[in-house]
Image: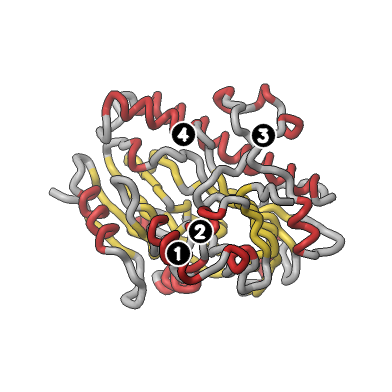
Amino acid sequence: MSASVAIFASASSWIESTALDQCHQVAALPGMKHVAGMPDLHPGKGAPIGAAMSSSVLYPFLVGSDIGCGIAVFPIKLKRVVPEKLAARFPDLDEADHAFFDVADVPGGWTESLGTVGRGNHFVELARVGTVFDSDHATRLGLAAGDTVLIVHSGSRGLGERILRAHTEVHGAGPAADPAAYLAAHDDAVRWGSLNRRVMAARVADALGAAYQEPIVDECHNSVELRDGLYLHRKGAADGDRRDVLIAGTRGTPSFLVAGHAGEDAGWSVAHGAGRKMSRADALRRGKVKHTVEELRRTPVGSLVVCGDRQLLFEEAPTAYKRIEQVVGDLVEHKLASRVVSTVPVVTYKTADRRR
């Protein structure tokens, strides 16, 4: 008998039928109890992205390969905010820099790639606080309109992939044979992802001439936890149980920092971003018709994108994603979250631009 499925999206939100099908396929797995789809729901490799899934059985493939991927928000104080000058000073986050961490403190001993951003939808963004929706909550976080923040979105940079591969080579998409052993490795990857975000923030702050400050938000969105005797898998969904979460927009739109108050029906979770509406292949094909490279390097909000990979520029164009305002609006409508502040991009780093 299939588990229950709940989709937290309004009637005006577009959700691909393939993603809905994947939710029901997951619901039919042995031991599954409930599947909650967020408004950013979209198809993934074998399992939906933007979902929280509860089961009496631990399924590593429902977490995926980038265990520990998440988004952190760091305050940063700058004397002057000139996008062109700041973009030119960003460090090369494709290359590790061991000066910013102690090798002895690295979870799992995985020092390879620590302090690097990776590809895909990962980014490091200098942004300013735009609209303040909840002044009391914003004040508690130390935020006010016009403040600058660093937003870092990255994960475990190969460590999570190694953990998943060790499982799938033996068990495929089946359950973990030794849940305790998987969870121990998983927890290392989650800690590694959080450290990775801190190292990158320290590198960027140093390059921009600012002091590093600890994050005010750091939430993972690819993970599994034991909750009420069940394994709660999150794939592209953040902990929304009385947690503050930065829900990422795109390079050319705002993001939203929200206060989560999701309940059991939503898997105690909220969305993690705008969610793709086009595959990478479609975004590349359509983007080359609609945009030039230079158009994608300067966004409609006046921000700059540092990205030396032309293909990635098209794959990650704002038009490849759903409207972040709709996604966040759905969360608010379903009483899963409330808006605290919006953030507006100033400089978004994707990968080094070696033309400079």
Which residue is label 2 attached to? 316
Give the alpha-carbon distance from disc 3 to disc 4, as whole Å.
Answer: 18 Å
Local SS, label 2: loop
Using the image as rendered, state which of residue 188 and residue 203 is in the foreground.
203
Task: Say whether disc 3 or disc 4 marks the residue closer to the N-terminus.
Answer: 3
Give the alpha-carbon distance from disc 4 to disc 2, as whole Å.
Answer: 23 Å
Local SS, label 3: loop
Which residue is label 3 attached to? 96
Q: Residues within 10 Å of mark 1 (few under 14, many from 20)?
A: many
Image mark for residue 160: 4
Residue 348 point in image, percent of width and height: 64, 58
User: Does 220 appear above or below 175?
Assistant: below
Left or right: residue 203 versus residue 291 is right
Image point 36% across, 73% down: which residue?
Answer: 13
Residue 245 point in image, percent of width and height: 55, 57
Q: Are marks 2 and 1 in contact (CB under 8 Å)?
A: yes
Q: Amino acid at mark 3?
A: Ala
Q: Nearer the viewer, mark 4 or mark 2?
A: 2
Using the image as rendered, state which of residue 227 and residue 315 is in the foreground.
315
Give the alpha-carbon distance from disc 2 to disc 1, as whole Å.
Answer: 6 Å
Which residue is label 1 attached to? 320
Q: Quadrant of residue 83?
A: bottom right
Local SS, label 4: helix
